[in-house]
Image: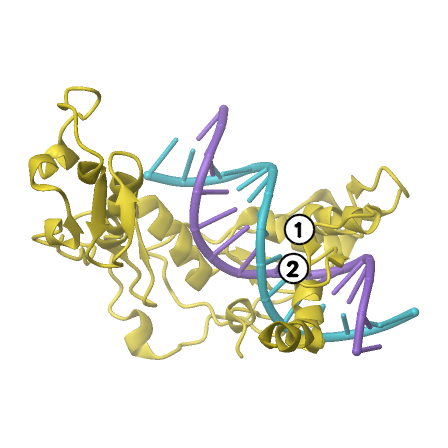
Chain colours: A yellow, B purple, C cyan
DNA sequence: CTGGGGACGGGGCCC
DNA sequence: GGGGCCCCGTCCCCA
C-alpha cells in the first residue's frame, strides 16, 4: 500500500513542478550551522506529466472549481411536519411544546433516528457540512476542503516549497523542514522528564512517554493489554488476539 | 515477533 | 489569510 507521504519523498532528487504562480515561494531555512557547509546543488524541477500542472492557474475564490451547492439538501432529512422549518431558524425556545413523537427525526441518508434539536440538527449539519461546505477542490488530487486556506495548505503538500539546503529534501511546511534539519544537526529539544532521553520530535517524545506508563494509551478491547502506539495495538490485533477472542465469542 | 525510536505527513486550532 | 504549532497518525528500521 503506497504511503502518501512517501510519494512526496525526495530523498535523492526533487520533483518540484513550477507552481511559482500558484504557491508561496520556495523556503530555504538557512540556520547558522549551514555556514561553512557546502550546499548541495538543488536539481532543477523535473517536468512531470504536463497535465498535472499545466497550464498554471492561480487559485482564487472565483476561479476555484467550486462544486455547486446541492440545490436541495432538505430531502436528506425527515422532520416532523410541524418542525420542518426550524433548521434555518432560531430554535432557542420559541417552539411550541411538542410531543415525544415530534422529538424524533429520521435521517433519510442513514436511517438513523435522532433526538430533535440536538441530535438530528447536529446530524443534519454533518451531512450539510460534508455536502455543501467542502467546496474547494484540489486540482492535483480528489481532495476537497471547506476553506480556501485549507486548500492552499493542502496544495503545499503537492508543491513542497520548503527545501532542505543540506540534502535537497522538500517539505510542505517550514516546521516540517525544521524538524528534518534536526536530523542533520542532531538537535533534540524535547527531553523526557523521566529518563532524560531527548528527542527531536515532540510526537516521538509523546510516544516515548507511553513507555514509562504502566497503563498505555492504546488498549486491546479483548485482552486489555495496553500499547504505547496504535500501530503496536494493530499488530497485536492482527497477530490473532482478536481472532481468538472472536472464536470464543461465536460459541 | 515485539517493542520502541526515528522521520515525517496532514488536519485543525490559535495568534 | 497566513504562519506556527499541536496533535494524531503512519511507516520503516532496528534491537
In this orientation, does residue A152 appear? yes
Estimate the spatial distance between the alpha carbons at disc 2 and disc 1, rounded to whole Å: 35 Å
Horizontally, residue A151 falls left or right of residue A206, namely: left
Q: Is residue A83 above or below residue A127?
A: above
Give residue A1's position: percent from left, percent from top: 53, 79
User: Is A169 positioned to the left or the right of A227 in the image?
Assistant: left
Label 2 vs 1, first from the N-terminus:
1
| Chain ID at mark 1 | A
- Residue A68 image label: none
Q: Quadrant of the C terminus of chain A?
A: bottom right
Name the chain under label 2.
A
Between A29 and A180, the one nearer to me in the picture: A180
Number of the front mark, 2 or 1: 2
The location of residue A226, given as percent across then percent down, is: 74, 56
Residue A132 in view, yes or no? no
Vertical arrangement, residue A232 with respect to residue A194, above or below: below
Q: Which residue is mark 1?
A: A179
Q: Give me the residue at 17% from left, 37% from top.
A: A102
Q: Are marks 2 and 1 on the same chain?
A: yes
Q: Residue at x 75, y 47 (%)?
A: A205
The residue sitting at 67% across, 63% down in the picture is A222
**Quarter holding residue A88:** top left
How far across and how far down the image is residue A150, in percent?
37, 48
**Residue position marked by numbered label 2 in the rendering:** A221
Amino acid at each position: 500500500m503506497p504511503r502518501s507521504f512517501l510519494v512526496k519523498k525526495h530523498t535523492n532528487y526533487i520533483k518540484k513542478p513550477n507552481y511559482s504562480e500558484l504557491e508561496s515561494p520556495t523556503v530555504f531555512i538557512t540556520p547558522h550551522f549551514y555556514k561553512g557547509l557546502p550546499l548541495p546543488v538543488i536539481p532543477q524541477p523535473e517536468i512531470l506529466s504536463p497535465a498535472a500542472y499545466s497550464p498554471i492557474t492561480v487559485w482564487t475564490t472565483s476561479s476555484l472549481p467550486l462544486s455547486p451547492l446541492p440545490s436541495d439538501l432538505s430531502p436528506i432529512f425527515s422532520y416532523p411536519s410541524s418542525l420542518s422549518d426550524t433548521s434555518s431558524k432560531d430554535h432557542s425556545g420559541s417552539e411550541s411544546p411538542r410531543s415525544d413523537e415530534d422529538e424524533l427525526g429520521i435521517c433519510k441518508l442513514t436511517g438513523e433516528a435522532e433526538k430533535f434539536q440536538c441530535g438530528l440538527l447536529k446530524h443534519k449539519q454533518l451531512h450539510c457540512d460534508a455536502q455543501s461546505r467542502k467546496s474547494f477542490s484540489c486540482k492535483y488530487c480528489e481532495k476537497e476542503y471547506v476553506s480556501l486556506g485549507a486548500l492552499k495548505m493542502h496544495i503545499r503538500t503537492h508543491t513542497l516549497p520548503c527545501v532542505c539546503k543540506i540534502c535537497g529534501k522538500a517539505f510542505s511546511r517550514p516546521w516540517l523542514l525544521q524538524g528534518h534539519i534536526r536530523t542533520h544537526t542532531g538537535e533534540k529539544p524535547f527531553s523526557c522528564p523521566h529518563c532524560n532521553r531527548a528527542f527531536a520530535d515532540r510526537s516521538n517524545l509523546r510516544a516515548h512517554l507511553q513507555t514509562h506508563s504502566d497503563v498505555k494509551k492504546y488498549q486491546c478491547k479483548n485482552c486489555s493489554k495496553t500499547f504505547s502506539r496504535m500501530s503496536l495495538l494493530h499488530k497485536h490485533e492482527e497477530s490473532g488476539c482478536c481472532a481468538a477472542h472472536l472464536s470464543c465469542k461465536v460459541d
